[in-house]
């Protein structure tokens, strides 16, 4: 009897010894190291930089970084090139009209460099957010300056006007070279912590039809959709190689709906997630509530997690703070979820922390966190709840 009792005691002591470090790691290390990112888009740049004098715009950047620090975020995803332009001193792309009165006009100082200096002084990572193909989100070509490569390529196969706007043709080799050279310029001239692509890839399925038929002359037959996927994969792989040479992160923020990426945007997230040759982070835009009828958050999150097989790719869910206090008309029976609850974002972070590939979360976007003009009463409560679970 004593021997049996001794074995029971030893068994429970072993359980305690094994379980204790796991619990300690879970609380003190894992979530303290998580990436807590904020997207800052060209919309914020237009608000805080454009049409401001140098002193005022720099003060606004100081405030942006201070706000991020005070909230215990540690990563800024800064849109540096949104329309074949730049918020930095580039020899390839003209100054952006998002920070200057007109495209090509120098705003008086290097916006990106100032962001980097301020952010790094406060231990905030800066990831340069790029929209690789988009030139304009309208069909108006008159705003494209002569300094823009897109101006030179108007009326050629390299630039196309489609329903979504004006875009570079992803299948043109010169277009890929332009984008890759732009990445090289960034990583060589600025101490950024990462390169980030958003979800804008193919604007339509016929933008490169001529390139496709040309490709078939010298290659094995593939479908047009497969050709689109191949063209994007080629670019993504090239960018990943460049970032690895500089030992910085490459991330992509695809649409939350996995199948839409593959069949509509021609972003091969299946391949990117299972291989270490394309990205380091996937930051899927899981802009859905828990009660979204067709795309419930928990289900979609786990689908993304399941995509990561033997690779080192990490998942950082992007979360829709902008939906708080509003009707989500695409959620069907769950359309009122963001109106009736004020702790959705908090619960989404807590839920995400349980997946094996988790490495943090990202909030879209800055103004919904820090500009009361863009906040509802529900948003303010959501923010308070989110702050409760962000560790120092």
Image: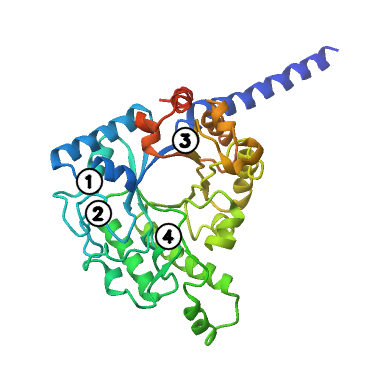
Q: Quadrant of the N terminus?
A: top right
**N-term-proximal mark, 3 vs 4:** 4
Q: Are discs 1 and 2 less than 8 Å apart at CB?
A: yes
Residue 223 against residue 366 in the figure, above or below: below
Residue lying at 40% horizontally and 34% vertically, measured from the top left = 368
Mark sitting earlier along the chain (2/3)? 2
**The image quarter in which residue 264 lies:** bottom right
Which corner quadrant holds the C terminus?
A: top left
Q: Is residue 74 visible?
A: no
Q: Which mark is residue 321?
A: 3
Discs 3/4, front? 3
Q: Mark 1 = which residue?
A: 50
Q: Single out the mark in the foreground, 1 or 4.
A: 1
Q: Residues within 10 Å of mark 1 (few under 14, many from 20)?
A: many
Residue in the foreground of this view, choosing between 245 and 355: 355
Q: Which residue is mark 2?
A: 97
């Amino acid at each position: 009897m004593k021997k049996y009792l001794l074995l029971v005691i030893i068994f429970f002591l072993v359980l305690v010894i094994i379980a204790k470090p796991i619990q300690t790691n879970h609380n003190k290390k894992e979530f303290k190291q998580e990436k807590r990112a904020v997207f800052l888009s060209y919309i914020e740049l237009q608000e805080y930089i454009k049409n401001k004098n140098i002193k005022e715009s720099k003060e606004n950047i100081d405030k942006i970084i201070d706000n991020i620090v005070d909230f215990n975020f540690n990563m800024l995803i800064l849109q540096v090139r949104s329309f074949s332009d730049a918020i930095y001193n580039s020899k390839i792309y003209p100054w952006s009209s998002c920070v200057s009165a007109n495209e090509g006009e120098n705003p008086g100082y290097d916006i990106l460099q100032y962001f980097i200096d301020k952010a790094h002084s406060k231990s905030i990572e800066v990831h340069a957010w790029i929209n690789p193909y988009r030139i304009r989100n309208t069909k108006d070509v008159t705003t494209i300056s002569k300094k823009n490569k897109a101006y030179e390529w108007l009326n050629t196969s390299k630039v196309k006007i489609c329903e979504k706007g004006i875009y570079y043709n992803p299948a043109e080799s010169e277009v890929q070279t332009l984008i890759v050279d732009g990445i090289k310029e960034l990583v060589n001239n600025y101490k950024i912590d990462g390169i980030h692509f958003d979800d804008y890839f193919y604007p339509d399925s016929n933008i490169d039809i001529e390139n496709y038929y040309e490709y078939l002359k010298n290659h094995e037959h593939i479908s047009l959709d497969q050709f689109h996927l191949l063209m994007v994969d080629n670019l993504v792989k090239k960018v990943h190689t460049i970032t690895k040479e500089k030992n910085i992160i490459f991330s992509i923020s695809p649409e939350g709906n996995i199948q839409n990426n593959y069949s509509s945007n021609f972003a091969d997230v299946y391949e990117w997630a299972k291989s270490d040759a394309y990205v380091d982070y996937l930051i899927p835009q899981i802009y859905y509530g828990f009660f979204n009828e067709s795309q419930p958050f928990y289900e979609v999150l786990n689908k993304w997690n399941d995509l990561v097989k033997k690779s080192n790719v990490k998942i950082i869910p992007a979360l829709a703070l902008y939906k708080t206090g509003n009707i989500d008309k695409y959620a069907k029976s769950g359309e009122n979820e963001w109106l009736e609850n004020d702790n959705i974002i908090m619960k989404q972070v807590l839920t995400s922390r349980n997946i094996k590939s988790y490495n943090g979360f990202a909030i879209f976007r800055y103004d919904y966190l820090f500009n009361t003009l863009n906040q509802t009463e529900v948003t303010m409560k959501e923010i308070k709840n989110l702050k409760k679970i962000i560790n120092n």
